[in-house]
Amino acid sequence: MKPATPRSARRNASERPIYVLNGPNLNRLGTREPDIYGTTTLAEIEALCHKEAGSRAVVFRQSNSEAELIGWIHEAIDAACAIVINPAAFSFTSIAMLDALKMFEGPIVEVHLSNIHRREAIYHHSLVSPIATAVIAGLGARGYRAAIRAIVEGGTATGR
C-alpha cells in the first residue's frame, strides 16, 4: 500500500483557501453591544476579508453551533492553507474545538473584536490562544484585515 500524500503536498498553499470561521452571536454584529463590538456587521467583515485577500480564495462562515464549527475545522484540515478564527464565547469553554484546531498543520490566527484582556476576568483566558500562531484582539473589524494580510504576505509561520 502506498503511503498517503501529506495534505501540505497536495496543493500549493496559495491555491488553498483561507478559512475564516466565526463563533456564536457574531451574526448579531452591528446591533449587539455596539459599545463593545462596534457597528460593523458580519457581512461587512466578510467583504473586508475578501477584499484584503485579493485573488486568494476565502471561505467565510459563522455558526452558533459548536459542532458545526468543529466540522468546518475538520474540513479546513484537508482543504485550507490557514484558519482565521473568532471563536467568540467558545474561546473560553470549548476543549473540543481546541482539540480540532490542534490537528490543523497551517497557521491559525485567533481574532477578537474587543480586547479580551480589558474585559471581565471570565474573558481573559482563551483556550485557543496557546495553540494559535497569532492572536489579534481589540482592533475591531480591522483585526480580520490584519489576520488576512499576515497570511497573504506569508508572515504567519506556524511556530508550533
Image: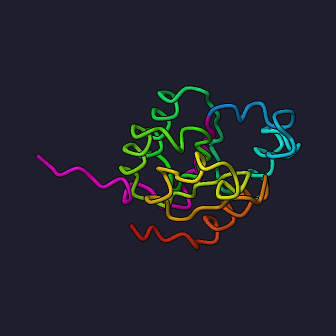
Question: Does the rendering let one see residue 47?
Answer: yes
- Check the image and name the residue furthest to the front: 121
The answer to if 15 sits in the magenta stretch is yes
**Residue 21: which quarter of the image?**
top right
- Residue 130 placement, left or right of 45: left
- Which x, y percent locates residue 72? 50, 36
- Residue 96 placement, left or right of 47: left
Seen at 58% across and 73% down, the residue is 155
Seen at 78% across and 58% down, the residue is 142
- Which x, y percent locates residue 110? 58, 55
Q: How is the image coloured?
A: rainbow
**Residue 117: which quarter of the image?**
bottom right
Seen at 66% across and 56% down, the residue is 56
- Which x, y percent locates residue 87? 58, 43
- Check the image and name the residue furthest to the left: 1
Note whether 2 is above or below 32 in the view shown: below
- Which x, y percent locates residue 88? 62, 41
Note whether 116 is above or below 122 in the view shown: below
Taking depth in this image into account, of 63 and 112 the one nearest to the observer is 112
Label count reads: 0
Highlighted range, magenta = 1-23
Question: Does the rendering let one see residue 53?
Answer: no
Taking depth in this image into account, of 124 and 1 the one nearest to the observer is 124
The answer to if 63 sits in the magenta stretch is no
Seen at 38% across and 66% down, the residue is 160
- Residue 34 placement, left or right of 110: right
- Residue 65 placement, left or right of 24: left
